[in-house]
Amino acid sequence: MTIIKRTKARRAPAGLNGWLPLSSLWDSAAPLYNSEQSARWAIKTHRRALIEAGAIGKHTGRIIVRPERFAQVAEQEALQAARRSLEKLQTR
């Protein structure tokens, strides 16, 4: 009987330099998110901005990311949310 051990990919898919597997967002030395669920929520919530910025893509049916671009989009979205909150407070 052969046992196959699955390992997490931590490198770019062949020919796609700069792209990493989705798990790099939470399973790395300096993760952007604390969990897979948090990363997937961010993708669901900010999908359009992430695609337009070239922060997420698909390769062989799997989501791949460019963490530096993903972080830029996350920062922009956080600032926009803060501005909206401030505007709500000012209109009260």
Image (cartoon, rainbow, N blue to C red):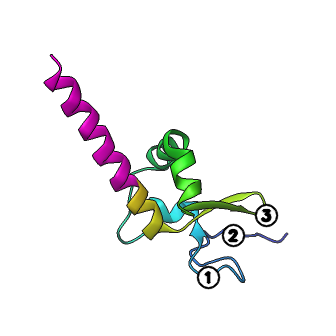
Q: For the residue labelled by badge 3, is the local secondary structure a helix, a strand or a loop?
A: loop
Q: Amino acid at mark 2?
A: Lys
Q: Would you identify the image quadrant in which residue 56 lies?
A: bottom right
| Foreground disc of the pair 2, 1 | 1
Where residue 28 appears, as percent x and y from the top left, is 43, 69
Query: Closer to the camera, 54 or 14?
Result: 54
Circle 1: is it few (<14), some (14-19), or many (20+) Cα within 10 Å? Answer: few
What's the distance in space between the residues labelled 1 and 3, CA to CA?
15 Å
In this view, the residue in front, 11 or 50, is: 50
First in sequence: mark 2 or mark 3?
2
Q: Helix, strand or loop at disc 2?
A: loop
75 in the magenta segment: yes
In this rendering, which labeled residue sits more in front, label 1 or label 3? 1
Q: Which mark is residue 17?
A: 1
Q: Position of residue 26 (x, y in %)?
A: 44, 59
The residue range painted magenta reads: 74-92
Residue type, label 3: Thr
In percent of the image, x 35 and y 53: which residue is there? 76
Q: Nearer the viewer, residue 69 or 34?
A: 69
Q: Nearer the viewer, residue 21 or 18?
A: 18
Residue that badge 3 annotates: 60
Q: Quadrant of residue 32?
A: bottom left
